[in-house]
Amino acid sequence: MNSCGIYIHIPFCGTKCFYCDFFSRVADNGTIEKYLADLIKQIKSARYENFRVESIYIGGGTPSLLSGDAVPKIAEAVNMTFSVDPDAEFTVEVNPESVSVAFIKKAMSCGVNRVSIGVQSFDDIELKTLGRRSRAAEAKKAFSMIRDAGITNINTDIMLAIPGQTESSLEKTLCGLISLSPEHVSAYLLKIEDNTVYGKKGVQEAPEEIQREMFFFTSNFMRDAGYEHYEISSYAKPGFRSRHNLGYWQLKPCFAFGAGAHGFDGHERYYYDKNIGDFFEKKTEEYLDEKALAEERIMLGLRTSDGVCIPPDKISYADFLVKNGYMLKIGKNYALTDEGFLVSNKIIADIL
Amino acid sequence: MVTDISKIRNFSIIAHIDHGKSTLADRILELTNSVQARDMESQLLDNMELERERGITIKARAVKLDYKAKDGNTYVFNLIDTPGHVDFNYEVSRSLAACEGAVLVVDSTQGIEAQTLANTYLALDHDLEILPVLNKIDLVNADPDRVAAEIEDVIGIPAEDAPRISAKTGLNVDLVPEEIVKKIPAPRGDSEKPLKALIFDSVYDSYRGVIVYVRIFDGSIKTGDVIRFMATGAEYETVEIGYLEPLGMNKTEVLSAGEVGYITASIKNVKEARVGDTVTLAENPTDTPLKGYKKVQPMVFSGIYPADGAKYDDLREALEKLQLNDASLTFEPESSVALGFGFRCGFLGLLHMEIIQERLEREYNLDLITTAPSVIYRITKTDGKTVYISNPTSYPSPSEIELAEEPFVRADVIAPSEYVGTIMDLCQERRGVFKNMQYLDDTRVNLHYSLPLNEIIYDFFDALKSRTRGYASFDYEFEEYRKSDLVKLDILLNGEIVDALSFIVHSERAYPRGRKIAEKLKENIPRQLFEIPIQAAIGGKIIARETVKALRKDVLAKCYGGDITRKKKLLEKQKEGKKRMRQVGSVELSQEAFMSVLKLDE
């Protein structure tokens, strides 16, 4: 039996944040109920033999907008269709303003053991700048509530190089996080895409040097606080790396459900249309032959601190990068340093 | 059926780009009912895809048409189309030599342009009867009276009665063939004399071998005759002869004096049947070939390299195939430290070079890197030897040079008089020597200059067009070699000379040019992990310096499900771009970077 992950997409939000280019929209309850019914039908009709599910991830959008029964229904459908490992990592994404104790308790009752909270910042001005609905105090409260409910594996998303962010405001956010002691932190450099509110307003990303400083500051801060910087944007306490996310970077199959969701069966990358009313038809994005798989293994493996095996003809380049501080040699593998992470697009392009 | 020689009219059409040559040719084809409407692809004569796109004729063409004139007789028209660019001047002269007359089409909203003038003079040199036609009279801004006066003043031929037509709408077009019948003389020639036929074009066909386009001056030829090419001495037995008709080649038994047609004889390479050569019969040869044969010499040289070094053999094969059809293209292997193995290619001019590059890329699917074009410098060394240098890398060191000379051209620039100042500035910047200026009419002038060829092969025409908003036209011909103060300018990246970027320049122009190139390269070299110094140097002396800053941040923060394919597509695109990149030492150079150094007038 091969291990796999399951990704379920909930494309609904209370409002759209200024930086967000994920597929999500504001919708009424009727639409959401109908979507949920379709989603469960889609999961139940899936036929993937010989896979054991090691991680489930309900993302969005804002899954915590769903009613309390929604997650158990989804979990039931997954359990009916797949063989789910009893120790599977089961994550639900939530937003501070919409999550409730009841939602968390019901989720836990059906196996959810990891919660990811969209914090972004503990600075209210920055939150406002980002178009977030919640404020810092609300996020802290939500965190404690989730912890008190019994979730022992919590991720918080934060953002670096927010317009107006300074090293001291970033430090404030990081200190706030450490005091809450999440098991996992995802810290993303803000990227402004064209099809976002920011993009349309012509908001500019922070200058490169500022982005670098924020990245290094975060990395050093988190390491000092006992976290492993195990992927470009991911930090975890020992033993709490996200199995689901690692699955993407290790090319594990991950079956996806829901409108706009992208899945991978080990060879084929596929997706469903971004159409809330009709997302049943599976569409092939691409089929990966051995060569493409090998390339993706390098492209994705270089995102992680474990690194990858470098093809023989690129070893001299890799050694050159080691000598100049962009890479480290770890056993047989080569992995990027923080400096390397920052220019990883270029390095990956050179190695492929 | 042998045509009565008195009923033959051999002519070509001279016109500036966009003045309506192809449209008029199409109309004449229609009037002679030669082509059914449904068979007509617009502008039938230009049948190479590239030609249609660029609106120019690269190769000469010929077509035989039957025209029933108002006098009741049927005439044979041989319309010989000519290339429309200065690079192909010699081909034009041979096409004109095959005719007795030329229809001069002038846009009555514009007037005479430099190219038209040059070709008209060429036609007058060959004693052709010139038949002016004023086109585009349907346009509101047409001024046929002014343009007719201009033709009379400048060329000195009567134009008062010139047909005033619109090839586009068909208005008065029927006057043109009548004029051709009346004014253009029938060919003279004696079918009983030994064969004398002029090659005005030859094309390679993979099934038949070379198809030789000829005009018979004396004698006649039939299938099976053994022919001799007088310049090359090659002899072949003719396989087929015939006429070039609108819908293709039409076999015939015999071609006689005055006629135009084709010959095939299983000839493997156009070099054997060069444009301008005389064809005669081996058995009963003529004593004297037709005048005017010369082997055309390339004027502009450039290194062509496969972007992917492994495609070297493919490039050689492609060049060999193109050469089958283009005797003026030369190439020989060369190697560059920066670019590896490639070829130094010789072209008639810049357009010819662009066409060859484009054909290599399109028809042979090759990605190329080309170096800056160079002219041929004549260097007399201190040991008394004279060398011709077409590759800057082989330029001798200053201590070995006794005398350096560069080619100058005689140039005509025709433009509205308000641009005189602008044009003079441009020519001055390009080290031009003003000769004189001639008013064509109240508003238009012809400026005569001597210009160094190396100043016009880069971007002169583009600069001229943009500074005169497209109103100026330009033509040139080789004048002479002149003593010049030349230096070799080297470009260093990361402290190392990139041989493929070296070029030869006049010493006065070296500083600004070096600075500009360094700036251009800075814009065109992608940032890399390390800072890259760019330097321009003469000998050991650095005259300009720029720096490409190191890449500081290029990272994808999120990479989950759907991001992966997106990221990979981005990488694929980068890889595609990289195919066209060359690793020069530790620096990646794109084709754009190589070419950016050419376009400095922006």
Image (cartoon, rainbow, N blue to C red):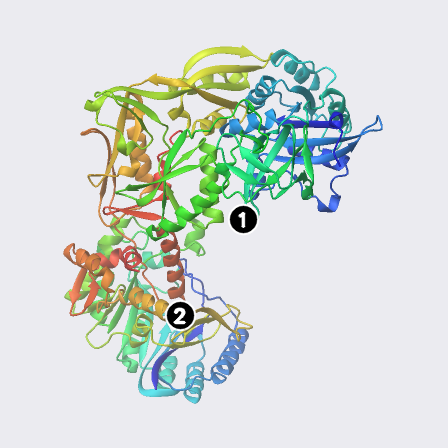
Output the chain of dot 1: B
Q: Quadrant of residue B506?
A: top left
Q: Which residue is mark 1?
A: B206
Q: Is residue A304 left or right of residue B469?
A: left
Query: A90 or A326, which lies in front?
Result: A326
> Measuring 30% from the left and 28% from the top, which residue is drawn there?
B504
User: Which amino acid, by three-letter code, is at mark 1?
Assistant: Ser
Q: Which quadrant holds the N terminus of chain B?
A: top right
Q: Is residue B440 left or right of residue A347?
A: right
Q: Secondary structure at mark 1?
A: loop
Assess whether mark 2 and mark 1 are in contact (beta carbons under 8 angstroms): no
Output the chain of dot 2: A
Is A268 situated above or below B427?
below
Q: Estimate the spatial distance between the alpha carbons at disc 1 and disc 2, rounded to whole Å.
A: 41 Å
Q: Which residue is mark 2?
A: A288
Q: Quadrant of residue A104?
A: bottom left
Q: Is residue A63 left or right of residue B3?
A: left
Q: Is residue B535 left or right of residue A247?
A: left
> Measuring 41% from the left and 67% from the top, which residue is drawn there?
B562
Q: Residues within 10 Å of mark 2 (few under 14, many from 20)?
A: some
Query: B43 or B542, which lies in front?
Result: B43
Query: How far across and how far down the image is residue B529, in percent?
Result: 24, 50
Q: Residues within 10 Å of mark 1 (few under 14, many from 20)?
A: few
